[in-house]
Amino acid sequence: MITVFYVSYDAPREVRSALGGLGRGDTNISEVVRDAVRQGHYLPVAEIEGDNIEHAWTMMQNGVMTESWTMAPPKGLRPLAAPLVENGKTYGHRSADLGDVFVVDGKAFVCLPVGFGEVPGLTTMVMLTLKA
């Protein structure tokens, strides 16, 4: 089982900027992600059957396997976050992106510009409970 955590939509600009810079230069990936987790800037959005992280990432791309992974989840994906409602219109969540975390078999991996990087010490339970 893979649990996917998105950077919250209301995360401060500096947090989103730091996570957007992951994998570029001398950024300490683990430190940046852990800081964002401690500050409560991640939310669980989906559970995916299996342990293939690349396949899970593909399932989380809107318009690839289905039009919206939130509104019409592909087989094996269970949304944990309700669709967004704004001005009476319902929207699905965005595709997986830089800084999002996939927890696979007890190990956390963050989306980088190319591939994933492991974040030692983070698990689903830690992601759900760790706050500053």
Image (cartoon, rainbow, N blue to C red):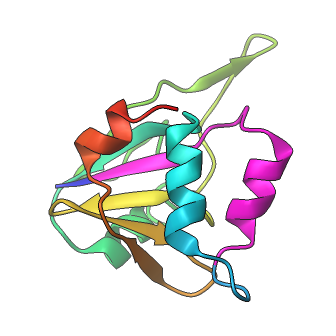
Q: Closer to the camera, 109 or 68?
A: 109
Is 22 situated above or below 115? above
Task: Decide if residue 73 is on the left or right side of residue 96.
Answer: left
Displayed quadrant of residue 41: top right
Q: Residue at x 67, y 78 (%)?
A: 27
Displayed quadrant of residue 21: bottom right
Task: Decide if residue 50 is on the left or right side of residue 104.
Answer: left
Is 10 situated above or below 74? above
Task: Decide if residue 97 is on the left or right side of residue 121.
Answer: right
From this viewpoint, is residue 63 visible? Answer: no
Task: Decide if residue 90 is on the left or right side of residue 43.
Answer: right
Estimate the x, y position of residue 99 in percent, counting from the top left. 59, 62
Q: Residue at x 44, y 63 (%)?
A: 65
Displayed quadrant of residue 22: bottom right
Estimate the x, y position of residue 26 in percent, counting from the top left. 69, 86
**Which quadrant holds the N terminus?**
bottom left
Estimate the x, y position of residue 58 in percent, counting from the top left. 44, 70
Q: Residue at x 63, y 48 (%)?
A: 94
Please state the extent of the stretch shown in magenta in the rendering: 3-22
Residue 16, magenta (yes or no): yes
Estimate the x, y position of residue 82 in percent, counting from the top left. 48, 24
- Number of numbered discs present? 0
Q: Closer to the camera, 46 or 104?
A: 104
From this viewpoint, is residue 47 visible? Answer: yes
Q: Residue at x 45, y 79 (%)?
A: 116
Is 18 situated above or below 42? below
Residue 14, magenta (yes or no): yes
